[in-house]
Image: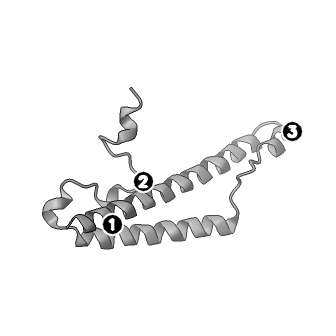
Amino acid sequence: MAGEVEKYLTAFNGANELHDRLLHAADVIQEFADALRDELEERFDAIASDWPTADELKGLFRDLAQSREQAWALWRLVPKDMRVHLPSPDRIGQEIEGNADDDNDE
């Protein structure tokens, strides 16, 4: 029983990490788009060194989709009475209340 929970949480956390990477890529692209609206000189300075390539973005979308599918498959293996204690796969990419990171903000 604990094995299914641990495997699920590993998959859930992995999907969240991929989601965070996708959000970071979106932020980089947004910063560049904002710079395009400003002065010409700022346009080239706005191109970050961590600019994602098209292949990297495609791979990230593919990996995130596969990771979500894996999380759902493992969720179905977790006993129903244990699920109430876990974040469901539809919460991937959302902030979870009671997260350890929340305690550090105080």
Residue located beneath label 1 in the image: 7
Q: Please tell me whether mark 2 or mark 1 is closer to you in this view.
A: 1
> Could you tell me which residue is drawn at 20 percent across and 60 percent down?
83
In the image, residue 53 lies at what x, y percent? 70, 63
Q: CA distance from mark 3 to mark 1?
A: 49 Å
User: Are the two marked residues, 3 and 1, in contact with CB atoms closer than 8 angstroms?
Assistant: no
Q: Please tell me whether mark 2 or mark 3 is closer to you in this view.
A: 2
Q: Looking at the image, is mark 3 or mark 1 earlier in the sequence?
A: 1
Disc 2 secondary structure class: loop
Residue 51 tag number: none
Q: Amino acid at mark 2?
A: Gly
In the image, residue 20 lies at what x, y percent? 51, 52
> Could you tell me which residue is drawn at 23 percent across and 64 percent down?
2
Residue 93 tag number: 2
User: Are the two marked residues, 2 and 1, in contact with CB atoms closer than 8 angstroms?
Assistant: no
In the image, residue 64 lies at what x, y percent? 48, 65
> Could you tell me which residue is drawn at 50 percent across and 59 percent down?
18
In the image, residue 10 lies at what x, y percent? 38, 61
Which quadrant, please, contains the N terminus?
bottom left
Q: Answer few, some or many: residues within 10 Å of disc 2's Cα (few below 14, many 20 plus, some between 14 and 19).
A: some
Q: CA distance from mark 2 to mark 3?
A: 35 Å
Q: Amino acid at mark 1?
A: Lys
Residue located beneath label 3 in the image: 41
